[in-house]
Image (spheres, rainbow, N blue to C red):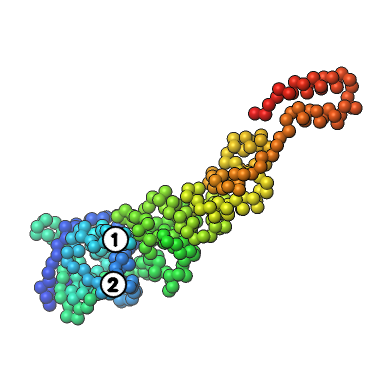
């Protein structure tokens, strides 16, 4: 990097932009986080996403490009972003690419930015104002400049290349639709990405969910590090995504097996989902009703119902489905009927005294009640 700066200084007198960011800023960030920010900027731009890999000696390079895009020097200011009010953008904090350059530089990677008709080269330098080492951007003009933005990162290992691919869905298949199981208004349910959460195509974190999801940024906002998300918000959204697929029979199976992706299926449940759950329950337990607890089970059995325990979500979905709520309750014979029937069938087999005593028992049973 110093050699590159020496070449620049020998040809031009560069403009130096001094950023009030020290070398140790965002110490918990590494290569993955930095690359994610550069990929995010490219995805958020209006140009077609482009990321290419190459070789430079014994190491690898990656170039992330945005055609028809240039960055004014004012975007070097922390908090300066054009995406603050754009819900369709992943980033809106005005820090991403600046911190990305710092982190990559700190980790020993080469960084060069072709920004329209200028080159930007980040370096650490002593600030005459702050009397400490800060991030500086050395800007020099290009004769063959064009209206494009390219971040070139050099010195990558094989594992670094894999990390770049893993962090971005668009780099994992020639045709993105090959990765998709269902497209919804909220984003895509992914076929082969179990437990993986992406927002706007960028990897966020692993989850406890059975499927992978690539959610549109306007439906799931992330904090600055973009590595965690509210479990409640995510599960509420994934049940809405499944409702949007119209795969009602499959959703019923998910509800029946208590799949976490559909944990809140008992809230805002479409009637067609209720119908599918009802059909599934009737197929598995003909003539039965559902109980959500042991106490509920015992109460329904006392009323003569054939009853099975299901989990809370299935019970609540069924309870609000009209055909299910109209199930006929089986009549239970009162004790006096049972006793009289027994006496009629066994009178010849007992003596007179036993017969008289049993009639007295029947008379007493007239005051018995089911509880």
Crowd rating for badge 1 (residues with CA inside 10 Å; few <14, some 14–19, many 20+): few
Q: Which residue is mark 2?
A: 66
Q: Position of residue 181 (x, y in %)?
A: 49, 65
Q: Residue at x 10, y 73 (%)?
A: 13
**Residue 151 in view in this figure:** yes
Q: Residue at x 44, y 60 (%)?
A: 213
Q: Position of residue 131 (x, y in %)?
A: 11, 56
**Residue 125 in view in this figure:** no
Q: Which residue is mark 1?
A: 86
Crowd rating for badge 2 (residues with CA inside 10 Å; few <14, some 14–19, many 20+): many
Circle 2 SS class: strand
Q: Position of residue 150 (x, y in %)?
A: 26, 72
Circle 1 SS class: loop
Q: How many marks?
A: 2
**Which of the labelled discs sits on residue 139, or is there none?**
none
Q: Position of residue 347 (x, y in %)?
A: 87, 27
- Closer to the camera, 130 or 45? 45
Quarter of image, res 137: bottom left
Q: Residue at x 55, y 51 (%)?
A: 274
Q: Is residue 129 placed above or below 175 in the rendered structure? A: above
Quarter of image, res 254: bottom right
Q: Quadrant of the C terminus?
A: top right
Report the side of 192 relative to 278 (left or right): left
């Amino acid at each position: 990097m110093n050699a590159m700066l020496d070449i620049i200084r020998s040809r031009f007198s560069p403009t130096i932009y001094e950023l009030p960011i020290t070398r140790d800023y965002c110490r918990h960030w590494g290569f993955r986080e930095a690359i994610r920010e550069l990929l995010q900027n490219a995805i958020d731009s209006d140009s077609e996403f482009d990321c290419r890999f190459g070789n430079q000696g014994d190491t690898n390079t990656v170039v992330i490009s945005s055609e028809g895009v240039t960055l004014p020097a004012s975007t070097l200011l922390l908090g300066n972003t054009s995406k603050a009010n754009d819900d369709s953008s992943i980033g809106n904090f005005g820090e991403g690419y600046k911190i990305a350059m710092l982190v990559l530089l700190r980790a020993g990677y080469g960084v060069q930015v072709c920004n329209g008709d200028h080159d930007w080269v980040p370096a650490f330098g002593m600030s005459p104002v702050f009397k400490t080492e800060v991030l500086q951007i050395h800007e020099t003009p290009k004769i063959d400049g064009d209206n494009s933005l390219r971040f070139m990162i050099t010195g990558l290992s094989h594992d670094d290349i894999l990390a770049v691919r893993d962090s971005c869905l668009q780099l994992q298949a020639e045709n993105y639709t090959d990765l998709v199981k269902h497209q919804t208004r909220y984003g895509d349910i992914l076929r082969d990405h179990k437990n993986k959460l992406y927002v706007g195509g960028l990897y966020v974190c692993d989850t406890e969910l059975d499927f992978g999801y690539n959610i549109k940024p306007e439906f799931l906002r992330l904090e600055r590090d973009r590595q965690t998300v509210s479990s409640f918000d995510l599960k509420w959204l994934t049940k809405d995504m499944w409702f949007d697929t119209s795969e009602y029979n499959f959703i019923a199976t998910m509800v029946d097996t208590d799949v976490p992706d559909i944990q809140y299926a008992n809230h805002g449940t479409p009637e067609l989902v209720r119908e599918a759950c009802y059909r599934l329950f009737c197929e598995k337990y003909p003539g039965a009703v559902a109980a959500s607890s042991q106490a509920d089970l015992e109460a329904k059995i006392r009323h003569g119902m054939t009853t099975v325990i299901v989990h809370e979500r299935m019970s609540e979905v069924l309870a609000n489905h009209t055909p299910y709520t109209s199930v006929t309750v089986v009549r239970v014979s009162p004790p006096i009927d049972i006793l009289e029937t027994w006496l009629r069938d066994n009178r010849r087999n007992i003596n007179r005294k036993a017969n008289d005593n049993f009639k007295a028992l029947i008379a007493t049973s007239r005051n018995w009640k089911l509880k």
